[in-house]
Image: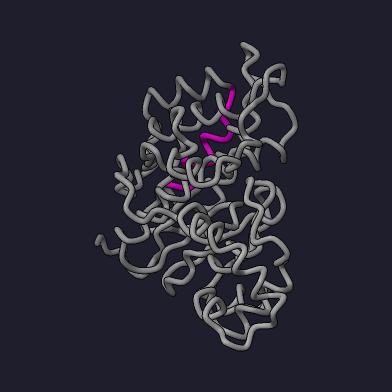
Amino acid sequence: MTRAADGRPTLLIDASSLAYRAYHAMPAVRAADGTLVNAVVGFLNFLARLLADRRPARCVAAFELGDDWRPAFRVALIPAYKTHRIAAEGEPEDEVGPQILVILEVLRAIGVSTAHARECEAEDVIATLTARFAGPIEIVSGDRDLFTLVRDERVRVLYTLKGVSELAVVDQAWVRAKYGIPGDRYLDYAILRGDPSDGLPGVRGIGEKTAAALLARYGSLDAALAAPDLSATVRAKLDAGRAYIAAATRVVGPVMDCAVIDGDGALPGGAAEPRVDELARRYGIQASVTRVLESLRSRSA
């Protein structure tokens, strides 16, 4: 396990999540050749602010690359998993995907650490990396599934509430206050409640209020399933949903042992290499790149 210096956090960034947030928060911005770069600009501006505000000891941007971003094991267990992210025939092409590759190219040129893994999503890469670094860890994402990682008291999620400018600091106390459940049991809550936007129906008849009440009373999903004093109605719903619960436990829960490629977390000093200047000019993102370089230089000063 790699130890952070001076108690400063290791910053783990869900790059795909933030790119989509930036895309929706920014007006259309195009390079001279017409390439759309609003997600690139928004992402880099947010990264510059994060580096300046959080002053991390290390930083890794986690990506989903290739055609296997929707892991086969998850689809096999719940075929509807994230089908909304697959473009149907005749739908317009995703405008963020190509920009994510530009973000990756720019970060690598600057020297900011990136990571990915085959058959794993960015949240799995991040979950795996939490076990590789000692000391405090801050995860930046708009994906609530990552709240499950705050069961490790070293971990906080900086959750994007509004675009990429307003963050909630999510820890066990925040989870308790927000959902009325034990702070280390967000995974149990997510399994019961489901998330239709990700193709996860949850346990039929068990909504947010009932899920929270069960966990508040019994402390965990396993304890609720074994409780002798459940009402007949709730017991029938949980019994009917046992197959789903077993599948969702593996689908919703992050993989903690991905074969992560790269991701050492090392941060550069902020020197402008020729490659960086060339990319900044090509995409017309000089101001955003400069902000990132300045934040890196001030962090290491």
**Residue at x-position 60% and y-position 57%:** 144
Q: Tell me, yes or no, whether the highlighted magenta stretch contains residue 143.
A: no
Residue 157 coordinates in the image, percent (x, y): 53, 62
Question: What color scheme is it?
Answer: one colour
Compare residues 146 and 165 and report the one nearer the observer. 146
Q: Tell me, yes or no, whether the highlighted magenta stretch contains residue 288.
A: yes
Prevailing secondary structure of the magenta residues? helix
Q: Is residue 301 shown to the viewer in this render? A: no
Compare residues 272 and 226 and report the one nearer the observer. 226
Residue that sits furthest to the left in the current view: 1
Q: Is residue 40 shown to the viewer in this render? A: yes
Q: Quadrant of the C terminus?
A: bottom left
Q: Is residue 253 left or right of residue 81?
A: left
Q: What segment is highlighted magenta in the picture?
A: 284-296
Q: Is residue 294 left or right of residue 201?
A: left
Q: Looking at the picture, does residue 227 appear above or below residue 90?
A: below
**Residue at x-position 55% and y-position 39%:** 44
Asked where in the image residue 199 lies, by quadrant, the reply is top right
Q: Looking at the picture, does residue 1 appear above or below residue 110?
A: below
Residue that sits furthest to the top in the current view: 33
Residue 242 coordinates in the image, percent (x, y): 55, 63
**Residue at x-position 39% and y-position 59%:** 10
**Residue at x-position 56% and y-position 21%:** 283
